[in-house]
Amino acid sequence: MKAQLFESIREELRARLLRLKEAAQDAHAAATDTDSKAESKYDTRNLEASYLASGQAKQVEELAESLRLFEAFDVMLIERSEKIVMGSLVGTADSAWYLLAPSAGGLEIIHDGREVTVLTPSSPLYQKLLGKALGHSIEGSSRVITTVL
């Protein structure tokens, strides 16, 4: 089940990366187009387009790195454990599902009819879940861990 979930996330990241690359290329083209030269000293279209292109290029790099980390992460190497570790899929009594992953934090994906939220080490919730086990409560909430896969 987790292998399929990881592959679904990889596919979503690949699709997002492709769309973002296309948008970044369009923004770059707009920024460097000879027709976008300023018509007056108050015309900032070219400057705005270059800022957009720069920002999107940075997003492409970040998303590509996130995908690289996900592709390098081998979920099959994770030993079955009662404790929550990176790679664990965690369900709570209130039907929330979380995947502790190396990247793509905040991504929400539907898998097997459940919405799964990806958490990364920088997430406070990730830190609260790490090392917990079945039946434990999540610190600072009334949620109880009901499933650890």
Image (cartoon, rainbow, N blue to C red):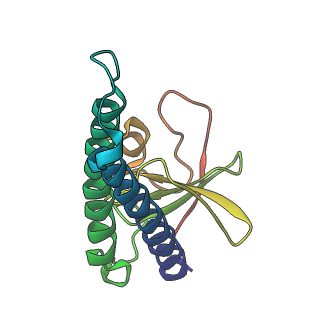
Q: Is residue 95 left or right of residue 137?
A: right
- Rendered residue at 65%/50% (across/down): 96
- The quadrant in which residue 10 appears is bottom left
Most distant residue in the top direction: 42
Q: Return the x and y of residue 26 as percentages of the image width and height.
A: 40, 56
Can residue 86 be spotted in the picture?
yes
- The quadrant in which residue 52 appears is top left
Nearest the eye: 4 or 37 = 37
Q: Is residue 27 left or right of residue 65?
A: right
Q: Return the x and y of residue 65 as percentages of the image width and height.
A: 25, 62
- Rendered residue at 27%/16% (across/down): 41
Q: Is residue 47 above or below residue 105?
A: above
Q: Is residue 90 above or below residue 77?
A: above
Nearest the eye: 65 or 90 = 65
Q: Return the x and y of residue 105 as percentages of the image width and height.
A: 41, 50
Nearest the eye: 113 or 69 = 69
